[in-house]
Image: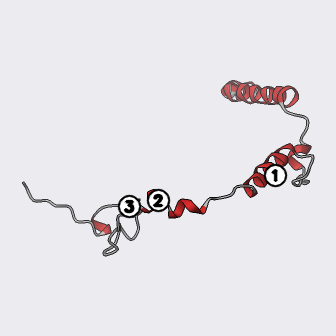
Amino acid sequence: MKDFLQKRKNIIIAIVIFLVSFLIYAFFFKSSDESVVLKKDIPALSQENTKGKELLAVLLSLNNIKLDEAIFSSKLFTSLQDFTVNLPSVGTAGRANPFAPIGPESGFVENTQNR
C-alpha cells in the first residue's frame, strides 16, 4: 500500500487540491440565486417597464414626423445624378465549393513554366 501511495503521490495531491478549490468556489463565490436562470416568466411590454416606455415614446414620436413632398419637386433634388455602377452578371463568381482544398485533386492546376 505504501508503494502505491509513493508512485501516485502527485496525482493524489492534484485531486485533493482540485476538490478543495472546488469546495471553496462552491461555498464562497457561487451565486445562491439560481432561480433567475430557471425563470420562465418574461415581462411583457408594459407601463412598468422603463425600457418599454422609452421605446414606446420613440415609436410614437415617429408618428408625428411629416415629410414635405415639395423636396422631391425642387430643382436641387431633380439635378442629382445617379452614379450607379452596373455589375456584369456573365460568368461564375468564385469556386463551386469555396471550402474545398486547393490542389491537384480539386482541379486547380499550378503553372510550372519558368518565366
Which residue type carries mark 3?
Answer: Gln
Q: Quadrant of residue 27?
A: top right
Estimate the spatial distance between the alpha carbons at disc 1 and disc 2, rounded to whole Å: 34 Å
Residue 70's disc number: none
Q: Position of residue 53 (x, y in %)?
A: 85, 47
Q: Quadrant of the N terminus?
A: top right
Residue indicated by mark 3: 81
Q: Name the one closer to the observer, 95 or 1.
A: 95
Sequence-first disc among 1 and 3: 1
Which quadrant of the figure contains the C terminus?
bottom left
Residue located 76% across and 49% down the image:
58
- Residue named by callout 2: 77
**Dot 1 alpha-carbon crowd within 10 angstroms: few under 14, some 14 to 19, many 20 or more:** some
Residue 32: x %, y % from top left: 91, 35
Count of numbered circles in the view: 3
Q: Nearer the viewer, residue 96 or 29?
A: 96
Of the residues shown, which amino acid type is indicated by label 1? Leu
Relative to 17, 36 lies left or right = right
The secondary structure type at the circle numbered 3 is: loop
| Residue depicted at x 32% and y 68% | 106
Taking the image as shown, residue 87 lies to the left or right of residue 27, namely left
Q: In this rendering, which labeled residue sits more in front, label 1 or label 3?
A: 3
User: Marks 3 and 1: in contact by CB < 8 Å?
Assistant: no
Which badge, 1 or 2, comes first in the chain's sequence?
1
Q: Single out the residue that lies furthest toward the left.
A: 115
Q: Residue furthest bottom?
A: 90
Callout 2 amino acid: Phe
- Closest to the camera, between mark 3 and mark 2, is 2
Q: Which mark is residue 56?
A: 1
**Secondary structure of residue under mark 2:** helix
